[in-house]
Image (spheres, helix red, strand yellow):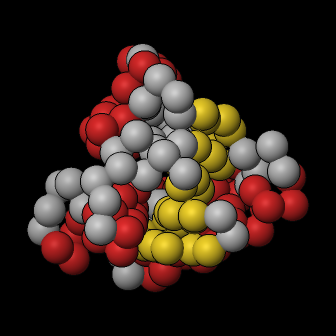
Amino acid sequence: MDAQRDEYFMRLALEEAHAAYAEGEVPIGAVLVLGDEVIARDHNRIEQLSDPTAHAEMLCLTAGTSYLRSKYLPQAALYVTLEPCPMCAGAMGWAQLGKVVFAARDPERGFLRYTPSLLHPKGKWYQGPFGEEALELLQRFFRERRV
């Protein structure tokens, strides 16, 4: 783990989460990195695209595989503001994603509740920085909609 690197890329993912918030989307952002290069970044677009699979992670995986012209991403790292759901974790496993760093845990719908083995066996994952900030943004989003 490189703390400065994780903070830098997670900050970019948080920028994406704030963009989602401003658009009325659930504020989750993701950044896909290869080496030191951001090859994809996006946020949830479920409402915009009327697509329940348009999670930030899925959009980054699609953009990253297209950019690299490869269905596999073993050297890539994904930084995401919320622990991925089982659907996203499964897609990461199929893409053989090398590393996943998430900011906030999702004890209700996160993949760790079900099984970490959804990721590729060689893939690494861990909770990174800014969990409180990411969680606060999500909580604020849902509080505003439930009033």
Q: Quadrant of residue 120?
A: top left
Camera sees residue 146: no
Residue drawn at point x = 38 percent, y = 69 percent: 68
Q: How many marks?
A: 0
Give x and y (percent) for residue 96: 40, 40
Give x and y (percent) for residue 83: 52, 41
Question: Taking 140 as reference, is 132 left or right?
Answer: right
Residue closest to the far left: 50
Give x and y (percent) for residue 18: 55, 75
Residue drawn at point x = 58 percent, y = 43 percent: 99
Quadrant the N terminus occupies: top right
Residue drawn at point x = 43 percent, y = 19 percent: 117
Considering depth in this image, is 145 or 127 the residue closer to the camera? 127
Give x and y (percent) for residue 42: 43, 72
Camera sees residue 56: yes
Residue closest to the far front: 69
Considering depth in this image, is 29 or 123 the residue closer to the camera? 123
Question: Taking 104 as reference, is 123 left or right?
Answer: left
Is 118 above or below relative to 125? above
Is 125 above or below relative to 63? above
Question: Taking 35 as reference, is 73 left or right?
Answer: left
Quadrant the C terminus occupies: bottom left
Considering depth in this image, is 123 or 31 the residue closer to the camera? 123
